Amino acid sequence: MHYVEITKPEPQIIVVTVQKPEPTIEEFQDYLSRMLKVYQKHQNIVVIYDTSKSKFLKADFRIKLGLWLKKHRELINQTVYGVAYVFDTPITMMMMKGVFLVQKPIWRNKVFSKKQKALDWAHQLIQENQ
């Protein structure tokens, strides 16, 4: 089982769903590698990160993610219309604030507590950019 499931439910929407509470080092690296391929392969997309199955991500993973975002920020910014983050607990919200301390997103982004609201926002962004 992967740490995250990456699906494309619609042509311009990528949904990244956390599948396990805590990743191993290998699973986390696999996740970052798979996401890099998503950003390299697609254009004009909205990415939705659904963290509802996530637990608190360890500090070394948060730092690694922040550094990865920093390294690939231009690619991500050129690829996406926006990124939605679905956090259903204060813990996951606090976790991502820590990641954003390492690398604040330069792309349009928004935080939601429900996946459907994130999907609605994704449709709005796609329509605005058509």
Image (cartoon, helix red, strand yellow):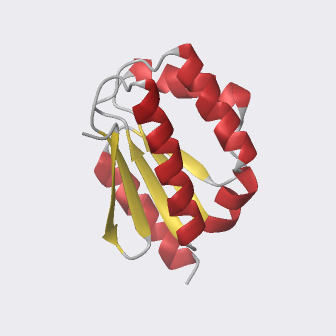
Question: Looking at the image, which residue sits at the far left?
Answer: 1
| Relative to 27, residue 15 above or below | below
Q: Residue at x 66, y 42 (%)?
A: 69
- The quadrant of the rendering that contains the C terminus is bottom right
Nearest to the observer: residue 81 or residue 55: 55
Q: Residue at x 40, y 34 (%)?
A: 27
- The quadrant of the rendering that contains the N terminus is top left
Question: Looking at the image, which residue sits at the far bottom?
Answer: 130
How many labels sit on residues?
A: 0
Q: Is residue 127 left or right of residue 66?
A: left
Residue 103 percent across, percent down from the top left: 72, 35
| Relative to 75, residue 112 above or below | above
Q: Is residue 39 left or right of residue 23?
A: right
Q: Residue at x 57, y 61 (%)?
A: 39
Q: Is residue 95 left or right of residue 70?
A: left
Question: Looking at the image, which residue sits at the far front?
Answer: 26
Quarter of the view holding residue 17? top left
Q: Residue at x 70, y 26 (%)?
A: 101
Residue 47 percent across, percent down from the top left: 47, 57
| Relative to 49, residue 64 above or below | above
Nearest to the observer: residue 29 or residue 109: 29
Residue 37 percent across, percent down from the top left: 53, 60
Residue 56 percent across, percent down from the top left: 42, 17
